[in-house]
Image: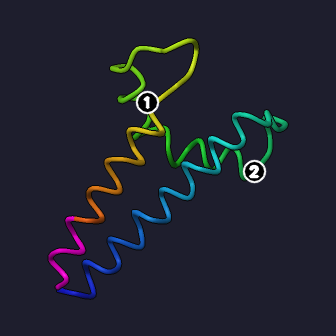
Amino acid sequence: MNLILTVVIYAIQAFIVIVFIRVIFSWLSPYPTNVVSRLAWQVTEPVLGPIRRRLPLVSGIDFSPLVVWLAAAILIGLLRNFLT
């Protein structure tokens, strides 16, 4: 059971890194055919899209990555409690 929880925690952490990459690319606006940018968008959009539709834009800023990051941090904390 510990191995499964550890793998899930690492997967969530990897997802957080991909969300961070997407946020950085949104600021830099790389060429649209950039493979890394497109991969980050395809991996994160199924999670960020529904959250973005429910959150209002505040001065044109998308807070869905922040919400995902907070939820992932809470989930990782809960999963680590099961490991001990």
- Is 60 placed above or below 7 here? above
Residue 66 shows which numbered tag? none
Label 1 element class: helix
Of labels 1 and 2, the one closer to you:
1
Q: Is residue 79 magenta?
A: yes
- Relative to the observer, which residue lies in front, 60 or 36? 60
Q: Identify the amino acid type marked 1.
A: Gly
Asked where in the image residue 53 lies, by quadrant, the reply is top left
The residue lying at 36 percent from left, 29 percent from top is 50
- Relative to the observer, which residue lies in front, 31 or 69? 69
Asked where in the image residue 56 lies, by quadrant, the reply is top left
Residue marked by disc 2: 35
Of callouts 1 and 2, which one flags the residue occurring earlier in the amino acid sequence? 2
- Is 10 placed above or below 64 here? below
Residue 71 position in % (x across, y down): 31, 48
Q: Is the magenta stretch mostly helix, strand or loop?
A: helix
Label 2 element class: helix
Crowd rating for badge 2 (residues with CA inside 10 Å; few <14, some 14–19, many 20+):
few
Q: Identify the amino acid type marked 2.
A: Val
The residue lying at 50 percent from left, 45 percent from top is 44
Residue marked by disc 1: 49
- C-alpha span from label 1 to label 2: 20 Å
| Magenta region | 78-84
Q: Where is the N terminus found, in terms of image quarters? A: bottom left
- Is 60 placed above or below 62 here? above
Residue 15 position in % (x across, y down): 48, 58
The residue sitting at the right extreme is: 31
Residue 7 position in % (x across, y down): 35, 78
